[in-house]
Amino acid sequence: VLKFMSNDIEFYVSSIPYFLFLEEDSSLRLKINYKLINHKRQDLNIGIITYLNGNFRSFEKINIDSAKMYQESVIKLPISSSLLKSGIYDITFDLKVNEKKIYSNKSPYLMKLIVVKNSNIDKYYTRKKKVSMKKEKNISLKALVKNIPIIGWFSRFLYNLLRLNNLKHTVFMLTKQEKLLGQQLGSLKQEFDTQKLQLGSLKQEFDTQKLQLGSLKQEFDIQKLQLGMLEQKCDAQKQRLLVLSEENRAIISKEIFYQAQSFQHRIDQFIFDSKIALKGDIDSEKLEKIHEFSKAFTDDYYLKFENEFRGSREAISKRYESYLQYIDMKNIDKALDIGCGRAEWVELLQKNQIDAFGIDMNHAMVEEAHRNGVKNIQNIDLFKYLKNLQDNSFDLITAFHIIEHIPFENLMIFFKEIRRVLKSGGQIMLETPNPENLLVSSLTFYKDPTHLNPLPAEVVEFMINYFGFLDIKIVYLNPFPKEMCIDEKTKSSEVLNKLLFKEQDYMVIANK
């Protein structure tokens, strides 16, 4: 009996190893028994392959009954002598489970097959007949001896006595072998008991290790939860630090502004008191120098403030590069940037072959622009500069973060003047903080102490439309980083993200 066992099936194949004789033009069906036990899978594809002297002979598929856990049957394999020569053949077989051979080249031996043709059969029966005749002669001689009175009985007695001695010797040897086998069985039983005890101790040790592993896993899970809680606390502390940092920067900014304003008031008070005390003894030229000193102090402070809270010159220049997409470079020959500051935008336009000009009231900003080699920059009041310009002077007028510094009455004059000096078909670009962002309208807007009031996009759009500008478009700029947004998919988080972390600025683009 040969067996194949796996996690899914137990398969047994058996056959009696007897000799089969085939005469010429004869055939038979070879019977092979099989048993299929404990098949846990219904998708198994099993078959038996039969070979004669290693050559493929037939393939029989086993039909698995899904309703039975045990099934047994007989496979009948056809064997025909019409295509076989006389001789002895080895019949081997292999199992094929799910298109994979189990035994491969080492197929198990099943039985022998002898094929004898007609001529060979005659020789075989002639030889068998001679042997039979010889045996009959021997039997007749023995019968003659046994039939002799007394001698025959005595010969039979001696013959049986000899057989009895041989039988006793055989019994003795078998008894000795039985005793020896009993001893071997006892030693094997002792060894089996020892192995059983060792297996029991190993099982106890395994159970102990399993319990320890379970306790370690629980401890690991607890540590993992604690680590997760610490990570959440760390993130919360990090967020608080960011908020505190922004609050501290706002507090410091306000404090610097108040101190600078206080110092400016002291200077102004000193000038006023000096005028009263001197009563005309000091000439106007000296008083003008005192005014220039006061303004120089404020301008230098504002330059340092811009560098600290708005960003470096390199960072602002890189941001302005994306603004080029909103203007038609081919139709712009002459441009004006109002409130140019350090003149990053003017420098970018000049590098793109545009005749660009910039004005700013802050002399420290203008000097910074001159130190960086930017041309056509003036330190002058914007209304004084616009008043002296002729109509239709520029193709492009820009004002980045300027209109929030201008009072409402002056802002109306500002829009009227820039429309007058702008050419027909010319373009304006106005950038200002976005008050729709609560962090901007309640905190970052007031980092600049010269800001007056935030201007909603709808208000600015209405004002420039009132003064006759066309093709008005609102572009929102500079959103907060995504890391600052609330990472939750709820309606509340969506509303908070929209109110707190949307774009910090917006730009109004329009044409004349």
Image: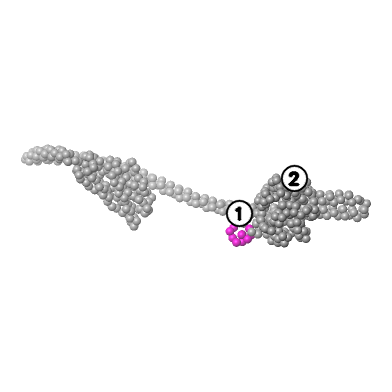
- Spot the residue most to the left: 149
Q: Quadrant of residue 53?
A: top left
- Label 2 Cα crowd, 10 Å radius (few <14 / some 14-19 / many 20+): many
Q: Which mark is residue 496?
A: none
Using the numbered discs, state the Cα–Cα distance from disc 2 to disc 1 in whole angstroms: 50 Å
Asked if 90 appears above or below 422 in the picture, the reply is: above
Q: Position of residue 99 (x, y in %)?
A: 36, 47
> Which region of the structure is painted magenta?
487-497
Q: Amino acid at mark 1?
A: Gln
Q: Is residue 422 visible?
A: yes
User: Is 67 or 349 nearer to us in this picture?
Assistant: 349
Q: Position of residue 243 (x, y in %)?
A: 68, 54
In this rendering, the label closer to the viewer, 2 or 1? 2
Q: How many marks?
A: 2
Secondary structure, mark 2, is loop
Q: Earlier in the sequence, mark 2 or mark 1?
A: 1
Residue located at (31% from left, 50% from top): 61
Q: Which mark is residue 374?
A: 2
Q: Quadrant of residue 188?
A: top left
Question: Is 219 situated left or right of 272 in this image?
Answer: left
User: Is 12 or 100 nearer to us in this picture?
Assistant: 100
User: Is 105 or 323 nearer to us in this picture?
Assistant: 323
In this figure, which residue is indicated by the disc labeled 1? 232
Q: Quadrant of residue 406?
A: bottom right
* Mark 2 and mark 1 residues within 8 Å of each other at the beta carbon: no
